[in-house]
Amino acid sequence: MGNKTSDQRNRVFNALERVRSQIGLVLGAAAGAKREAEAALAKIELERLIVAAGMDNATPEQQSVWRRHPASAEVFSMLRTVRSQFYTDWSAGPTSLRELVAANAPGPASRPPGDWLGRIGHNPGLTSPGLWRIGSSTVEGQAFDVAVPLLDEAHLSISSAPKTRAVVDGIVQNLLMRLLTTFEPGAVRVHLWDVGQLTAILPDLYPLSRTSALTLYDPSRLDDLLDELAGHIRRIHATGMQAGYMSLREIRQATGQRGEPWRVAVLYGNGETLEPERARDLKRVASGALAAGMSLVLIDVPTTLSTSVETISLLDERRAISSMTGPDLVVDLDPAFPSSQVSRAAGKIADALIARQGGPRTFADLLPMELGKESSAKELRAPVGFYEGETVEVVIGDATPHALIGGPSGSGKTNFLYSLLGSLTARYSPDELALYLLDFKEGVSFAGLAPGRRNASWLPHAKLIGVNVNTDREFGLALLRFLAEELRRRSAAAKEHEVTNLADLREQDPTGHWPRIVAVIDEFQYLFAGRDGVTNTATQMLEDIARRGRSQGIHLVLASQDIAGIDAFWGKPAVFEQCTLRIAMPKARRVLAETNNAAVAAPKWHAVVNHDSGVAHGNQLVHIPDASSKDVFVQLQNRLWDRYAQHYAPPRLFDGAFSPELDSASAFTQLIPTQRPRALLGQSIDVTEIACGVELPPAPGRNVAVLGAATAEALSIMNSAARSLARQFEPGTAEFTLSCPVEACLPAVTDLAERLRGEGHTVELVTDLSARLTELAEGMNQLDGPKVLLLYGVDAALPALEAKAPGVPKSGLDQLRIILKQGPSHGVHTVGWWRSVSRLKDTLGFGGTDDIGSWAALDVQGNELAPFAAGQVVQWSPRPGRALFFDRSTHGAPEVIIPFQRPEADRSGVL
């Protein structure tokens, strides 16, 4: 097929060159061969005179000059021979030329508009006419059609004359309508740019602007058009080179598929000199455009292109000269097609194109017919939107391992994420893809992907969903720790199997579970908001994961409104350099390369997708369908849930806006009686659901202090500690002593006492704490079972504890100190609440800090806690609903926890 088409094309242009020669001969524009060097000058002079005056009209003086010239006899003989040969050939010239144009400009390419304007083309675009009519001309009384090559044959340059803008528009619009009607809808894409006009560029074609067939560009943004065309050229060239082809024409001939549309870019320059950089860009585009099936139509653009260019120079409103016919042959231009007919025809083509594409493209059009059929061994591919009616893919793999997404509030960033996640999860099963999703800054973008009250379904691919993370930067750090640990695990497995990447590991270990991991962190800049240990650790871990994660199938998708102000990355570009996939929403800043401003002009519901680290030539403008409105994504999620839910567990949901419930925590429900009871204080901020607790064995210092004046959180910690301990004792084997001198907290303490009694435990709510402490301290060696002291507001009881009764050598405070020091070894453990650190110090006295082996601090500054944290610097700024937990027997440094929600809170009236 390719050789046949090539031979036909060669015959066409050989014939075309023969006709051009005939036209030149009749006008005397071609000279015969020179026999001798001495006669060359005479021949040239004689040819010029012949052209100017003609042999028949020569004056006697001119003829005398010619006859006396040494070379005249030879020249006259040559000219008679040439003319004789021409007139012999020319008798059939007009007929041959008309046949040539008819054969190579069939149908709308050359026929009058009445024969085709308003119809829909059926040529699929595998081949194209070689010529496109612009008018007619006459030689020696013989008329013939004038046509120009376009598309992958030549560019076209038009030079206007004064007051001929309407004529130029007619030439261009006629050519475009011939093109658009020759091919089926969608096979031709037109790009319009006019340096002098914002609107009204070929307005009759505007019905096409609601489709991919017509794109208009801002007058000040020529670079956007050139960058877009350059991106298409690079992509087509790369694809062709990989397959062994040098042009789009060769690809079509070999494969029998169109693959890419024809593109015609029309540039109105108004004679203005282009900036040097733009002129260079235009020349580069022109040099590679023809091989990529693109043709430039330049109107008054003062630039010389070093490639195949046909020219049309207007003389007036009806006539022009063309490079096709030579500078001395006038072309009578075809009149512009009727405006109303063109507009109606453009509307019909637009309607046909929309109908062919199934109407406006939606999120459902991104999804495959069957779910979960793709393999992620080598990479992940996900269509995220549409350009000119065709889907545009995002590729996440070894070449583009991580993505950086940027866009201001309201730009559609969340909608893009849903489009990406939906496309990925529809193509890859949970065995091929695992998602870890975090949303900082009061975000609930991903909340609907976890089971909820209104919809019990969840996204089976999601392993972790974090919403309303807000100030819990530790949760982001926990995710990075998890990814780092998974990276170490995969690296060890790769080393064991002597491979270097995930694809090879999966091939060598087919029974292993090695899905690609995609961690999406929305508003990730808040992870680095502070100048503290969290930021330092997170920065180091993120750099390591970004650098090494690509080969082990661990990918980051980092989204932000603005990445400019992340101090932690100043001078550390490694993270962003690894994010070679860039997605810029409209008006996004600093996501693409510094000189790439494509996002500035991007319209709403669009994004600039760039797989080349944000460099302009990699830009791809994409229309992102609505994926985040009510019930749009849910329909896909329900399908995925129906297919996979029975084989996979629901994701771990971390919602920073809610405190965890003790009764539903697995760490609480799984507690059983044991010799080493563990007091649960709250939930760890971690990827997995882990409760933080303190083991209370018979060892010195195993007491717990709750520090701070935050009443609600303190009551919650005391409550969860008591209830979790009670669950680990057989009923009746342990004794709980409660004391609460804080009147506002007494209802909550009373409720707790009743609950413990209801579970079969011995409970005493004392009012005279000093007497009870004295009894316990003096009888410590004769205790018949474990004792738990739950002391609320110890600081409020200090005045009474410090008082000594007459004749009693020790005060209640002395007895408390004895119990704190010696009690744990005898099975007496204290869980106490002090509303300030200084009051705890007063209670313990000199050197008593070792008697508090663990603590949970609430609204207490970090610098106050150093004496109770083995002297280390404690970085802690209090925040509501959070506590800082430290156990000197297990912790190297304090960690943030979330106190459990206290079920009695609503009934007690304590907030």
Image: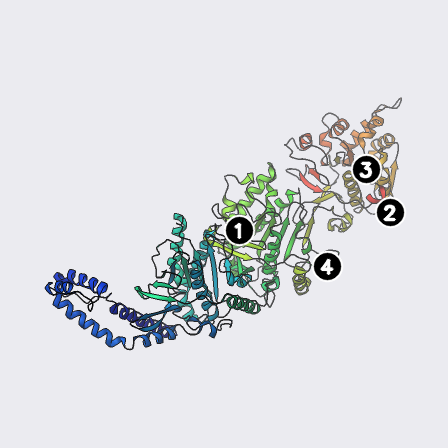
Q: On the image, numbered disc 2 is attached to which residue? A: 760
Alpha-carbon distance for marks 1 and 3? 65 Å
Identified by mark 2, the residue type is: Gly
Q: On the image, numbered disc 3 is attached to which residue? A: 790
Q: On the image, numbered disc 1 is attached to which residue? A: 601
Q: On the image, numbered disc 4 is attached to which residue? A: 456
Q: Nearer the viewer, residue 522 or 358?
A: 358
User: Where does residue 403 sit, x and y in percent of width and height?
Assistant: 54, 51
Q: Tell me: residue 600, above or below residue 849.
A: below
Decide: marks 1, 2 in contact (CB < 8 A)? Answer: no
Mark 2 and mark 4 lie on one chain; the one further toward the N terminus is 4
User: Where does residue 105 sit, x and y in percent of width and height?
Assistant: 40, 72
Identified by mark 3, the residue type is: Leu
Alpha-carbon distance for marks 2 and 3? 17 Å
Helix, strand or loop for disc 2 = loop
Q: Quadrant of residue 18?
A: bottom left
Farthest residue, direction top: 806
